[in-house]
Amino acid sequence: MAEPVSPAAAALSVGTVTLVGSIFGMRYDLLLIGLFGGLLRLGQVQSTSRKAAFSSVTLSAMLAGAVSPVAGAMTANFFGLPNPIDELRICAAFLLGYGWQSITPVLVDLVKQRLGGGAQQ
């Protein structure tokens, strides 16, 4: 069984996420929640290289920091809530950090089918 993630790789991911996130004005709590979701997802992967693990976890945090405020506001608007609730943003950050690796291949296949780039007959 492969070692999930070394502490050095996790520390490097946290440092990268907070530095880049602060440059782009993202909220630290959403970045770290997305990072945590990415680490949980990475724990389920059988084996992966350190570079792939670092990229995956960092992208999880970046997506959570960038997209979860919008997703929280859209969810609040959909359900008719008076304002974007912070709990919705936190939930969206975790779901994005954890689930983007599963959702992305499905979305790519859907876009290919819609644009006619799917399997040829």
Image (cartoon, rainbow, N blue to C red):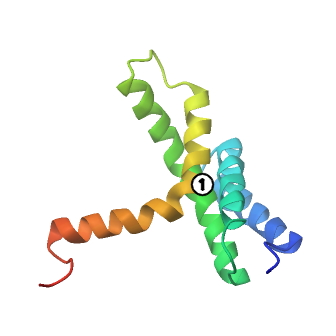
Residue shown at 69%/73% (left/top)? 54
Quarter-of-image position of residue 93: top right
User: Among all residues in the image, which is located at the extreme left?
Assistant: 121
The number of callouts visible is: 1
- Identify whether 45 is placed above or below 14: below
- Identify whether 106 is placed above or below 35: below
User: Among all residues in the image, which is located at the extreme top?
Assistant: 82
Quarter-of-image position of residue 16: bottom right
Question: Nearest the camera: 45 or 22?
Answer: 45
Residue shown at 60%/55% (left/top)? 98
* Residue 66 position within the rendered picture, expressed as x and y whole percent measured from the top left: 53, 50
Disc 1 marks which residue?
97
Q: Is 85 displayed left or right of 113 in the figure? A: right
Q: Identify which amino acid the numbered label 1 is placed on.
A: Gly
* Residue 28 position within the rendered picture, expressed as x and y whole percent measured from the top left: 70, 46
Residue shown at 61%/29% (left/top)? 87
Question: Nearest the camera: 70 or 117?
Answer: 117
Q: Which element is circle 1 on?
A: helix
* Residue 106 position within the rendered picture, expressed as x and y whole percent measured from the top left: 37, 64
Q: How crowded is mark 1: few (under 14 residues within 10 Å), some or many (20 or more)?
A: many
